[in-house]
Amino acid sequence: MGKIYAVANQKGGVGKSTTVVNLAAYLGSRDYTVLCIDIDAQGNTTTGFGIKKKSIEYSTYDILIGQARIQEAIRRTEFKNVSIVPATSALAGGEVEMISIDDRMNRLKMQLLTCRLDYDYIIIDCPPSLSLMTINSLVACDKIIVPMQAEFYALEGLSQLMETIRIIKNKYNPLLDIEGVLFTMFDPRLNVSQQVVAEVEKYLPGKVFKTKIPRNVRLSEAPSYGQPVMYYDKNSRGSESYELLGLEILGEEPPAKKEKKGLFKRKK
């Protein structure tokens, strides 16, 4: 049975879609089958895999309001072992339409139950809000990956997310847990970065990924080409970082420093 991760943070611009796209690509390159669910109306994960919005017949909107089965909406990407349920702007109004639907908190979960056995990993890209779409994702998932920047305002958002997780865990998904907090756009030279990491480690002991995702030009360029960074520039620091995150998710040790050649050659 595939593991289901929701990549969630109500704060925007923290690298949720970037994390979904690049983590999925790495896991796929390791011969794991991966399904991405884009449940954000902005559709950044959809764009990140090079899918044109005009070409989409069925999207997450259609499966949530009951106009299609998830199997009809799944599309294979050009990248090894990675498929996606894409998103369109129709999702923006989907939340209002779902208000009158019975069992609206479980719509995504019910759909994923019909395909969960077909994938090793299912990764959900949540919108930047604690909306009904995000709640559907938290009800459906096993674990949450929380991307965040190392800034003090982010700590406030994390506490709000933790309260939402507590409510969802008590009412809908008793096994829900945080897989880890992932620091993105990270600059280790800044004192504030180290202070925020220390605060989060104190607040959530054992729940912070060792991997930190740095600011990286190639990482920010890759989406405009519709490619994960490992396909756009496999030698970049961004590619290396998401490979290390993938190894951490898989519970594997990174290669020794002396073996860091080729894929691990650093490039700005």
Image (cartoon, rainbow, N blue to C red):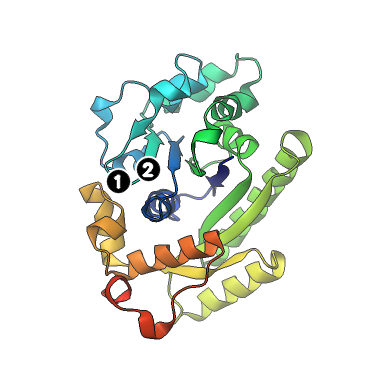
Q: CA distance from mark 1 to mark 2?
A: 6 Å
Residue that numbered label 1 is attached to: 79
Quarter assignment of residue 196: bottom right
Give the position of the C terminus as an image quadrant: bottom left
User: Can residue 178 be seen at all in this image of the molecule?
Assistant: yes
Given contact means CB atoms under 8 Å apart, are the residues at marks 1 and 2 in contact?
yes
Q: Which residue extends farthest right?
A: 170
Q: Residue at x 24, y 33 (%)?
A: 52
**Coordinates of residue 231 in the picture (x, y in percent):** 26, 56
Residue that numbered label 2 is attached to: 82
Secondary structure under tag 1 reads: loop
**Coordinates of residue 149 in the picture (x, y in percent):** 49, 63
Please indicate whether residue 112 sits to the left or right of residue 206 in the image.
left
Mark 2: which amino acid?
A: Val
Q: Which residue extends farthest bottom?
A: 258
Please indicate whether residue 268 sits to the left or right of residue 257 in the image.
left
Please indicate whether residue 119 sits to the left or right of residue 222 in the image.
right
